[in-house]
């Protein structure tokens, strides 16, 4: 005997999505925006550095108004390497942030002679194919003995860069030190004064910063 299927009972009360009150909807967006702002602030404070280049001292790598990101965690588990491009507190005035290239490492003797740089008495100068033009200013007669936990920093655009070659004199001129002997410690950047390593430029063109 054939069984007849029971007709589906129509439900006049159709399921409808329950609408939340408008103020709850608004509050959910506020929480999302607040969380995003807190996260962005934390990343900017503890992970990334967003910087705008103010001078020509690192040309041709970095030009005025270029925008870059740096990483604050770069040296958490490792030491800076030669040729790293680093943002750090200016030794003479800790309120000012500089960006230069690591040239001398802790314990090294660095000699600048006839536009070349020699490490620990080597007869072969380090390679510096990033210099934008022939180095003619303050290019001879410098001998640096880099202290422990310190680094020697120079700009790429050597003819105009204010860097380790001048900082001792700057310290005397600014009244931070009374003489050049006392001011020698301002020549070098301590590791704990380094804010982070430049990792890439994002404006006006993208560029990754890698050791040569």
Image: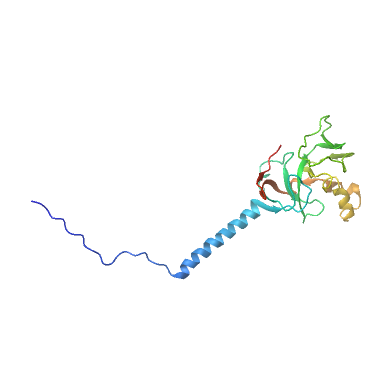
Looking at the image, residue 176 lies above or below residue 11: above
Q: How many marks?
A: 0
Q: Residue at x 74, y 45 (%)?
A: 191
Q: Residue at x 89, y 52 (%)?
A: 172
User: Is 169 positioned to the left or the right of 152 in the image?
Assistant: right
Colouring chosen for the image of the structure: rainbow
| Residue 157 pos. (x, y %) | 80, 45
| Residue 141 pos. (x, y %) | 90, 39
- Quarter-of-image position of residue 19: bottom left
Q: Residue at x 86, y 47 (%)?
A: 166
Pick the front one: 207 or 209 = 207
Pick the front one: 187 or 207 = 207
Position of the C terminus, as image quadrant, is top right
Confirm whether residue 198 shows in the render: yes
User: Is 33 positioned to the left or the right of 132 in the image?
Assistant: left
**Outermost residue to the right:** 179
- Quarter-of-image position of residue 138: top right
């Amino acid at each position: 005997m054939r069984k007849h299927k029971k007709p589906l009972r129509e439900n006049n009360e159709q399921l409808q999505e329950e609408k939340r009150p408008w103020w709850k909807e608004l509050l959910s967006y506020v929480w999302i925006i607040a969380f995003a702002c807190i996260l962005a602030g934390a990343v900017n404070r503890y992970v990334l550095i967003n910087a705008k280049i103010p001078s020509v001292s690192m040309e041709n790598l970095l030009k005025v108004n270029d925008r870059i990101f740096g990483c604050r965690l770069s040296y958490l588990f490792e030491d800076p390497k030669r040729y790293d491009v680093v943002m750090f507190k200016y030794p003479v005035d800790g309120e000012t942030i500089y960006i230069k290239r690591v040239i001398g490492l802790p314990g090294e003797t660095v000699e600048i002679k006839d536009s070349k740089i020699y490490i620990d008495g080597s007869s072969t100068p380090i390679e510096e194919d990033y210099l934008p033009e022939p180095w003619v200013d303050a290019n001879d007669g410098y001998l640096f003995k880099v202290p422990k936990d310190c680094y020697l920093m120079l700009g790429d655009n050597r003819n105009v860069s204010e860097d380790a070659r001048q900082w001792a004199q700057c310290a005397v001129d600014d009244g931070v030190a009374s003489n050049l002997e006392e001011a020698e410690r301002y020549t070098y950047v301590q590791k704990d004064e380094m804010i982070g390593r430049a990792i890439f430029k994002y404006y006006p063109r993208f560029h990754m910063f890698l050791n040569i």
